[in-house]
Amino acid sequence: MRNKLLPTQTLVILLGAVFGAVGYIYKIDLDIFKTIGAILMIASFVGLITVVSLAIQRYVIHGGPYFPSNNQATDAIMLLVKELKPKLAVDLGSGDAKLLVRIGKLGFKAHGYEINPLVNFLGKLNVILNKQSANITLFTKDLWKVNYNKYDVIILYAAMHMIADLEKVLFKNSTKGTYIIMNRFKFPNKKPLKIVDAGENKIYLYQV
Ligand SMILES: C[S@@+](CC[C@H](N)C(=O)[O-])C[C@H]1O[C@@H](n2cnc3c(N)ncnc32)[C@H](O)[C@@H]1O
């Protein structure tokens, strides 16, 4: 999930500023100039909000954006979950509970931790609409503050800048024998038990 949007947004903000400055300095009074200026201003505003929110996600909560696992990755993760037969699984950064609903439908119990209350609300709706409330519980909580001990399978689809710290924290604080399923990114120092090809992504399986 390397953020390719950030340079584009920064460029739009800069373009908006340059365009605005040129218009102001040279007192350009052309309709087409004003229309382009207005579009760039709106795009700059949206870009600025996105840049600020991404910066907060990254540097304040040490998290990443909402980006659901794609269908191929979800299918590959479910095959691993079926093999591992968790007593209690967890999705750290559970998003709209896409993975958790599938885990519930397989008959397993799981928890999800999601920092964004709005996204977690969508997740809760998803769980209710799919009649998985008996199997799946969602919490609005920072994944760095979770007690990982009670889970025997941990699932992660985190931003790249979180991976090295997650490796340290999870290998230190979860129970020995716990399985960790990672979508897309691999831990820098640990050797995976298994690597599964899931189209554009790879899924990595580790054991603590
Ligand atoms: C890439 S999405 C993955 C969603 C889901 N696990 C899936 O695979 O479809 C990552 C999710 O983690 C959430 N997140 C990011 N930082 C977090 C944090 N510190 N604590 C809890 N959730 C976090 C984001 O809001 C986002 O919904």
Image: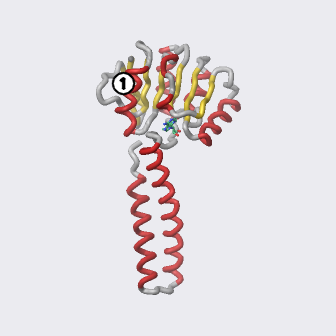
Count of labels shown? 1
Could you tell me the amino acid type at mark 1? Answer: Ile
Picture layout, residue 175 above or below residue 154: above
Residue 59 placement (x, y as % from top left): 42, 45
Q: For mark 1, does the 10 Å Cα neighbourhood hold few (<14), some (14 to 19), or many (20 or more) residues? A: some
Quarter in which the C terminus is drawn:
top left
What residue is at 52 percent from the left and 70 percent from the top?
Answer: 39
- Element on which disc 1 rests: strand
Picture layout, residue 207 above or below residue 23: above
* Closer-to-camera residue (169/158): 169
126 on left or right of 163 = right
Can you identify the residue that label 1 sits on? 195
What residue is at 46 percent from the left and 86 percent from the top?
Answer: 27
* Closer-to-camera residue (184/12): 12
Residue 173 placement (x, y as % from top left): 42, 21
Query: Colour mode?
Result: secondary structure
Q: Does the residue labelled 1 lie within 8 Å of ligand 1?
A: no
What residue is at 59 percent from the left and 17 percent from the top?
Answer: 108
Quarter in which the N terminus is drawn:
top left
The residue sitting at the left extreme is 189
What residue is at 43 percent from the left and 31 percent from the top?
Answer: 183
Picture layout, residue 36 above or below residue 96: below
88 on left or right of 184 = right
Residue 15 placement (x, y as % from top left): 41, 69
Residue 126 placement (x, y as % from top left): 65, 34
